[in-house]
Image: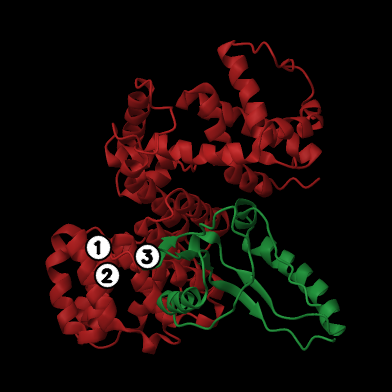
Amino acid sequence: MLYAILCYNEEDYVGAWTPEEDAIVMDRLGKVQQGWAEKGKLGPVARLMPTTAAATLRKGKEEPLILDGPFAETKEQLLGFYIVDCEGLEEALDKARELAAANPGKGCYEIRPVALFMPGGPLSP
Amino acid sequence: MSTDIGWINAALAAARPQAVGALLRYFRDLDLAEEAFQEAALRALSSWPKNGPPRDSAAWLIMVGRNAGIDQTRVRSRHVALPDDDAPLSDLSDREAEMVGRLDEADYRDDVLRLLFICCHPDLPATQQIALALRIVSGLSVKQIARAFLVGDSAMEQRITRAKARIATNPVAFEAPGAADRPERLGPVAAMVYLVFNEGYSASADEQPARAPLCEEAIRLGRLLLRLFPAEPEVMGLLALMLLQHARRPARFAPDGSVILLEDQDRTLWHRAAINEGLALLDKAVRHRRSGPYQIQAAIAALHARAATAAETDWAQIDLLYGGLENLSPSPVITLNRAVAVSKARGPEAALAMVEPLGDRLSGYFHFHGLRGGLLKQLGRMAEARDAFGRAIALAHSPAEAAHIRQILDGLQGP
């Protein structure tokens, strides 16, 4: 079974780190990841940009609605995620529109630029 | 314990907006809040070297400042027993955990914005709002603020005093603005945040360690502001602009402190993560199709950031963007900046034609003479170039600026 571990923290707190403090944290996390990678337990790792850089595509009656910021409603839960390679926000929104069209019902897609992406290695069974 | 107090000054500067904001909420008097902070800072200077920094500097300063302010106004709280004046300061540190418990961090982060919006009260003219905010929120000296505004010290002192007096007579000034009032004050608040950024960004190499934190503070305030106004494209543009400019910090100065021009910077040193965040924000802003000065400036910075080498810079596009900026907010400094792009895209002659008419208004401006000298030099008019560089040196703000021009001047040959 593969597991996703989703990181939550307060942006105010993380955003107040100096570049030096940030580098120390990333270094410590890197050491943890390295241990997993050596055992073939580490898949892709991503760090997202702050929510201020996010946009949301919400399914509307006809056209989907595009909003600034992460505006998922509290009754909506994170079901999964994609990492896609896009030229910019427009292309990312187009991709979200395609997903929205293929998916029945309501829901929304948060588009969050990725700040750091490490593809990881093959996972052992 | 080290006698070096540099770390204390840095901690005091970082905690200042939160601490003054909270003290102002408590005392509702700008002067008293500032004095209380000063008093707390003085006590920190005597206490922290002995006891080490408190876990939460802002909370420590708020509590000590609050007590000092209460003491000063002889108003005694009925609920909190105050320490005696003679009580050893170490007692204060021992109670630090308790203080932090009472001061919710989220609460005083909001105080910073409250402080910004109070300073940007619509009763005050914009220049007073910004001067006041720089003084109160960022703790810049009157001299530093006067320099940022290109006015004399005493004129700035007057401006700030007047602004304080005006706010003091307005009973509602200290209320946090309601949702409806916020957009009206957003423009001055954004301008203030950008000026704080520039105060840090324009510092010379030897001032950088002390003033670079202003850039980070401005970026932090920009993020805070964008979370209050998540759909405001100019706030996105402002944050993008600051991130894109700040990203160049590691490449802007040589080890000897001399300035490295944009075209000579080692672009591999630029902070990639900040650039990417700036580009993402700009991308988001553009979708609103409501252009503004910050978005345009961010777009110009983005074109520099996107060019892998200086030679690949899209100067024609930058020229167009500066044209748009000139239309929105005409200013001789913008025209001067545009002339740089014009010189790259269309040659020095076209650029010089653009620069010459600015002489009346920019004759006291270092960069005017520097750019003019550079253009004259390219056109082979050496004597005039030498004269222009000479004027630039006389107007330089820092030894590094002067040395840079002197270096060009030394390289000049011919009549």
Inspect the image, locate mark 3, and give the three-letter code of the amino acid beneath it: Ala
Instruction: Using residue B35 as the reference point, say whether residue B127 is left or right of it.
Output: left
Residue B81 image offset from top left, x and y in percent? 73, 15
Q: At which x and y percent is residue B348? A: 20, 83
Which residue type does callout 1 highlight?
A: Val
Q: Earlier in the sequence, mark 2 or mark 3?
A: 3
Q: Secondary structure at mark 2?
A: helix
Compared with B294, B30 (above or below) is: above
Q: Which chain is green?
A: A
Q: Given this view, does label 3 or label 1 mark the residue nearer the observer?
A: 3
Q: Chain of mark 2?
A: B
Distance in Å between CA atoms under marks 3 and 1: 25 Å
Q: Residue at x 34, y 72 (%)?
A: B300
- Badge 3 crowding class, 10 Å Cα cut-off, few under 14, some 14 to 19, many 20 or more, is many
Q: Which residue is mark 3?
A: B285
Image quadrant holding the C terminus of chain B, namely bottom left
Pointers 2 and 3 in contact (C-beta within 8 Å) = no
Could you give the CA–CA distance between mark 2 and mark 3, rounded to whole angstroms?
Answer: 23 Å
- Report the front residue among B22 and A50: A50
Residue carrying label 2? B337
Quadrant assignment, res B410: bottom left
Q: Are marks 2 and 3 on the same chain?
A: yes
- The structure residue drawn at horizontal position 42% and vertical position 61%, both measured from the top left corner, is A67
Between B66 and B179, the one nearer to me in the picture:
B179
- Tell me the residue that label 1 is attached to: B333
Report if the CB atoms under discs 1 and 2 are less than 8 Å apart: yes
Chain in red colour? B
Neighbours of disc 1 within 10 Å: few (<14), some (14-19), many (20+): some
Q: Nearer the viewer, residue B298 or A99?
A: A99
